[in-house]
Image (cartoon, helix red, strand yellow):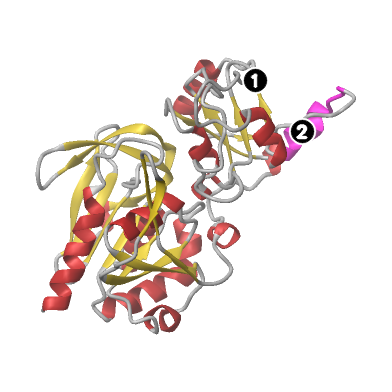
């Protein structure tokens, strides 16, 4: 059971399926040729897939990529992730687009007998993502260090051997490539659980605090996360948030959040940077948004979605903190927004020099 959503990306299905932000969701892939890249142990954003299932138009194809080590179907079965093929995904996507994301059930009885009434009752009875705190389910259980950097030909992943800044990343469902981007930008990264207290974060003496992506309703996660973020802000430690971290920062600053009708999910989402006028094509995965009308005067809107005008970024004018709704780590997706990690480092350096 889960919320049935759609993803418009043409590549990166393995990264998508392992993105912890998809916890509680069944993903409809709008691109028909899923499986052609196969699966490998490198293109994952978490050890196990977070999505509850997938819906595709065609049967999963044989891998035709030099990096593939196994068939996608075999990889899915090894993780117990159900899927269904042969669905008119265009029709389903239009239904979700026009009517919102419904609850759904994927079921495969060995004898082929379906109790449709019972399955419909299960779907109708699922509470949905609104009011649901899923960050605790996908967060790490204890703190750990991270020094792996981004993948690059021909050596693969690298290591940060000479970090310049100490950053604590709060794991609400962090993707691995976010941590790699922080390390590549010169950060010594310590990851802490979503439930870490301000004292547990600040005792690392961080030069900056990163608020990660994650699943579920930000208002529910905010019950324990918002007081922590506010205390970090009071210490004037530079803060950078993305996705759920963006929403939680908004809540900590006094704004409210709301559930979008259909959400933004895919690697081709246009966002306008209001400061520069530039449009960045971004990778996104979220079903909630910050209500920018509720932001205080000390916070400025920095980015907007060119799909529906919803908020995509904010920055404080009285303290070193900013956030974006999208995924600048680009895994999967374009690298238009990689510069935000360097902006975070520049903010850290400015505070150190003050």
In the image, residue 14 lies at what x, y percent?
53, 36
Q: Quadrant of residue 110?
A: top right
Depth order, front residue of 107/310: 107
- Dot 1 and dot 2 residues touching (CB under 8 Å): no
Chief secondary structure of the magenta portion: helix
| Mark toward the start of the polypeptide (1 vs 2) | 1
Q: Is residue 58 visible?
A: yes
- Left/right placement of residue 70 relative to residue 262 reads right
Horizontal relation, residue 72 to residue 176: left or right: right
Regarding mark 2 in the picture, which secondary structure is present there?
helix
Element on which disc 1 rests: loop
Q: Residue at x 38, y 62 (%)?
A: 211
90, above or below 234, in the image? above
| Horizontal arrangement in the rendering, residue 165 relative to residue 159 (left or right) | left
Q: Is residue 124 above or below residue 88?
A: below
Residue 320 occupies quadrant: bottom left
Q: Which residue is mark 2?
A: 119
Q: Which residue is mark 1?
A: 85
List the single residue furthest toward the right.
111
Alpha carbon distance from label 1 to label 2: 19 Å
**Quarter of the figure that contains the C terminus:** bottom left
Q: Position of residue 130 (x, y in %)?
A: 53, 50
Say which quadrant the N terminus sits in: top right
Q: Write the residue at 56% across / 28% down.
A: 38
Magenta residue span: 112-122
Of residue 55 and residue 125, the one placed in the foreground of this image is 55
| Location of residue 300 in the rendering, given as x and y in whole percent from the top left corner | 17, 57
């Amino acid at each position: 059971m889960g919320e049935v959503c759609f993803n418009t990306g043409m590549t990166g299905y393995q990264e998508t399926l392992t993105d912890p932000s998809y916890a509680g969701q069944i993903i409809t892939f709008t691109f028909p040729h899923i499986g052609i890249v196969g699966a490998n142990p490198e293109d994952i954003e978490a050890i196990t897939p977070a999505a509850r299932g997938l819906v595709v138009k065609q049967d999963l194809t044989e891998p035709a990529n030099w990096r593939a080590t196994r068939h996608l179907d075999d990889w899915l079965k090894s993780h117990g992730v159900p899927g269904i093929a042969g669905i008119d995904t265009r029709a389903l996507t239009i239904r979700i687009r026009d009517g919102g994301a419904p609850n759904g059930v994927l079921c495969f009885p060995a004898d082929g007998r379906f109790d449709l009434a019972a399955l419909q009752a299960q779907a109708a009875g699922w509470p949905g993502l609104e009011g649901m705190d899923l960050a605790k389910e996908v967060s790490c259980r204890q703190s750990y260090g991270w020094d792996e950097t981004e993948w690059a030909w021909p050596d693969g992943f690298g290591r940060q051997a000479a970090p310049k800044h100490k950053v604590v990343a709060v794991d609400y469902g962090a993707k691995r490539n976010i941590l790699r981007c922080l390390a590549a930008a010169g950060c010594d990264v310590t990851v802490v659980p979503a439930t870490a207290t301000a004292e547990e974060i600040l005792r690392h003496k961080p030069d900056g605090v990163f608020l990660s992506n994650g699943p579920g309703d930000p208002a529910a996660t905010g019950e324990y996360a918002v007081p922590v973020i506010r205390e970090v802000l009071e210490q004037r430690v530079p803060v950078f948030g993305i996705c759920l971290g963006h929403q939680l920062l908004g809540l900590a600053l006094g704004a409210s959040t709301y559930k979008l009708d259909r959400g933004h999910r895919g690697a081709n989402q246009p966002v306008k940077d209001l400061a520069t006028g530039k449009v960045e094509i971004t990778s996104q995965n979220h079903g909630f948004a910050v209500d920018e009308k509720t932001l205080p005067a000390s916070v400025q809107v920095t980015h907007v979605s060119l799909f529906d005008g919803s908020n995509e970024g904010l920055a404080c004018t009285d303290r070193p903190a900013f956030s974006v709704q999208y995924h600048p780590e680009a895994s999967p997706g374009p690298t238009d927004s990689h510069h935000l990690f360097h902006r975070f480092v520049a903010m850290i350096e400015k505070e150190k020099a003050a």
